[in-house]
Amino acid sequence: MKYVMLIMNTEAADKLTAEEQQAWSAEVMAWYEKNATTGVIADGGAQLQPPDTAKTVRASGVTDGPFIESKEVLGGYTVLEAKTIDEAVAVAQSWPGVNRGLITMELRPVVVF
């Protein structure tokens, strides 16, 4: 089954120094390389541009930015292939920065039509 792993940066991630950000990026790239060999990554996903580049579309109109009530910002996504949600959770928990409070993950099963 496919699961979308939504990767949300926390405020702590925004406070990293340039050196810390570079080291964390290297950890993330290693995570992708490791998990790509196991077949758990169904789609490499993508990193998103910063929130100030976003537009939000609602019935009331279009506004700049995401303007959601959250201290976390959607930073990217990856599509996982896993037998169960628990297996997908284990993969998400291994993402660099989750245990340091830099990232929050949301997993959602993909509906196949």
Image (spheres, rainbow, N blue to C red):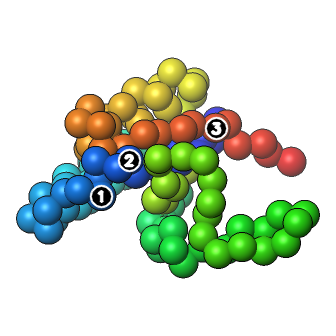
Q: Is residue 65 above or below residue 26?
A: below
Number of the front mark, 2 or 3: 2
Q: Could you tell me which secondary element the residue under label 3 belongs to?
A: strand
Q: Which residue is mark 3?
A: 108
Instruction: Classify 10 Å Cα crowding around label 3: few (below 14), some (14-19), many (20 and above).
Output: some
Instruction: Between residue 34 and residue 61, name the one nearer to us.
Output: 61
**Circle 1: is it few (<14), some (14-19), or many (20+) Cα within 10 Å?**
few
- Residue 19 visible to an observer of this rendering: yes
Residue at 51% in and 74% down: 52
* Quadrant housing residue 60: bottom right
Q: Give the residue pinned by disc 2.
A: 10
Picture coordinates of residue 44 (x, y %)?
Answer: 46, 60
Decide which of tag 2 and tag 3 comes sooner along the chain: 2
Residue 2 occupies which quadrant of the picture? top right
- Work out whether residue 64 or residue 90 is closer to the camera in this orientation and state it: 64
Closer to the camera: disc 3 or disc 1? Answer: 1
Q: Secondary structure at mark 1?
A: helix
Residue highlighted by disc 1: 14
Q: Nearer the viewer, residue 99 or 44?
A: 99
- Mark 3 or mark 1: name the one nearer the start of the chain: 1
Taking the spot 51% from the left edge, 68% from the top edge, the residue there is 51
Q: Are marks 2 and 1 in contact (CB under 8 Å)?
A: yes
